[in-house]
Amino acid sequence: MITLEHIYWLAGLMFAGVAIVNWRDRSNRRRFNNTAFWGVYAITFLAGSYLSDLANGFLLIVMVLVASIRGLGQGAGESATREEREASARRWGNKLFVPALAIPLVTVLGTVFLKRITINGLPLVDIKQVTVISLAIATIVALAIGMIMLKPPLLAPIREARRLLDAVGWAAVLPQMLAALGALFAIAGVGNVVAGFAQRWIPLDSPFAVVAAYAVGMAVFTMIMGNAFAAFPVMTAGIGLPLVVQKFGGDPAIMAAIGMLSGFCGTLMTPMAANFNIVPTALLELPDENAVIKVQIPTALMLLGANILLMNFLVFRH
Amino acid sequence: MLSLIGIVIVIIGFVLRMNPLLVVTVAGLATGLASGLGPLEVVAAFGKAFITSRYVAIVWLVLPVIGLLEHAGLKERARAVVAGLRAATASRVLLAYFAIRQVTAALGLTSLGGHAQMVRPLIAPMAEGAAENQYGELPQSVRYKIRANAAAVDNIALFFGEDIFIAIGSILLIKGFLDQNGIHVEPTQLALWAIPTAICAFVIHCTRLLLLDRQLRADLAQESKKP
């Protein structure tokens, strides 16, 4: 059976390759820092499941120290000039889209069909992780198509991956770190403290005030945690169920559905949701790391207002 | 109360623009210590949480093939295709992507998109190409604005589309949580009540996108006034 562990090995090999390419690149003054950073990251993928929690924790701290105190560098940049790329684009034409579009297409097909394939009664892939596994398989298929079509040198993919990964830099690891921070917040019971605050400090004596407090609370707590999934149980247990549903007789399904979407408004406004808001600024080479958040804030605020009104009208209809 | 120290550290760190990796690590360690764990226990808890969250990084597996295709001129091709469409503007390219992304996410096809797979190699170059087509060579600031908008479209269309699909993570989380509290709802009900917000998101953000072309024109006029 293909499980997440196999995919982690694959990712570990890629990060190890990135570390080695960095090590050999003399155009980067901080090449050894990059090697250490991606090398240790590779270890967490290749061996993380077998090491003790403490060993993994120290590996993590080494990565953070290398990235924040020593700092990561970048190699000489683009591997082809603009003219070369334009000439190549003319030569290949729309065929270039085939491998690129194969990624989403194969991922979607995989999520639909891989679940149904069994070998000797055992599923071919771990059903619970079918989306992630499909994505990994899709990248392999796309890479195979690209290699056959373009016939580049064998090591070109890993060199190109290195170029892009160094452009993203430590931000590539930030989403995972924030997920870990969320887990520590949960251990420490941060959510209950925040919900207690909300109940004590906000006047909650009219249905509209309660609905507004719940929706805004979802958005704000999502901004703090970086994740609406972490905010939902806390806010719904703290404000939603006792006040909106029990005190004022609101419909729980409507409240929960729109409450979650109010949380998503918060996701649009916070650097803590790094994979949606910070990583793209690195990927798109934007100098302002809050550029995406700034574009999203007006929509998020208007939509939060719309959610409060919608919830107020819909939840008490009965 | 003391357990909120992590939040304080995160806010201070982001305001002072310190390295976010360091800020998050310090916040995590402080939160763990404040909740009564020993120093080594905190490091272990952090390590464990980091290892169990590795799936977040799987998206980076797309980089070898995307890098290879970029080297072969994928972005340039994406620009050229849009340049051939006379009706294309940055606004319209992003509007079309918004609609496709939201509808496919509502059908459960959330992986038809993403910043590394779609926005960087295809959508952002197409939107830039459309603007170049209209206005000629663009100043960097305008390029940055178009790219940031492309990333925002991917996020907003995904967030407010996916909840209409009944088997998505957030719907299952809501159902599980309400079940635990003795309230039984059907996923279809939850998905149904995500539709009004989805429509609002479409109307609000697409209106803003329609205004983007005008904004870019204003930016360009201002750029050209600069010496």
Image (spheres, rainbow, N blue to C red):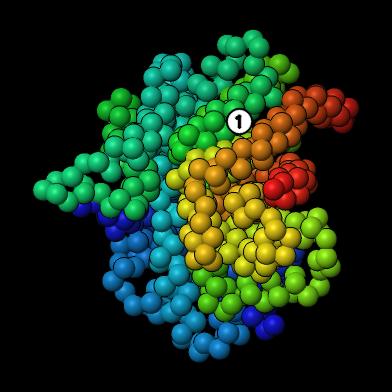
Q: Mark 1 belongs to which amino acid?
A: Phe
* Residue nearest the viewer, comparing B215 with A114: A114
Left or right: A5 as drawn, with respect to A227: left
Disc 1 secondary structure class: helix
Instruction: Give coordinates of residue A139: x percent, y percent.
Output: 35, 39
Please report the residue visible at 41 percent of the width from the left and 42 percent of the height from the top. Answer: B62
Q: How many marks?
A: 1
On screen, A271 above or below B9? above
On screen, A139 above or below B18? above
Left or right: B55 as drawn, with respect to B127: left
Q: Residues within 10 Å of mark 1 (few under 14, many from 20)?
A: many
Instruction: Please identify the quadrant where the N terminus of chain B is shown.
Output: bottom right
Q: Quadrant of residue A189?
A: bottom right
> Does residue A14 appear anywhere in the picture?
no
* Residue nearest the viewer, comparing A249 with A265: A249
Residue designated by label 1: B98
Left or right: B77 as drawn, with respect to A136: right
Instruction: Give coordinates of residue A61: x percent, y percent.
Output: 49, 74
* Residue nearest the viewer, comparing B16 with B27: B27
* Residue nearest the viewer, comparing B155 with A245: A245
- What is the residue that sits farthest to the left in this orientation? A120
Please report the residue visible at 59 percent of the width from the left and 28 percent of the height from the top. Answer: B99
Give me the chain letter of mark 1: B
Instruction: Please identify the quadrant where the C terminus of chain B is shown.
Output: top right
Left or right: B126 as drawn, with respect to B7: left
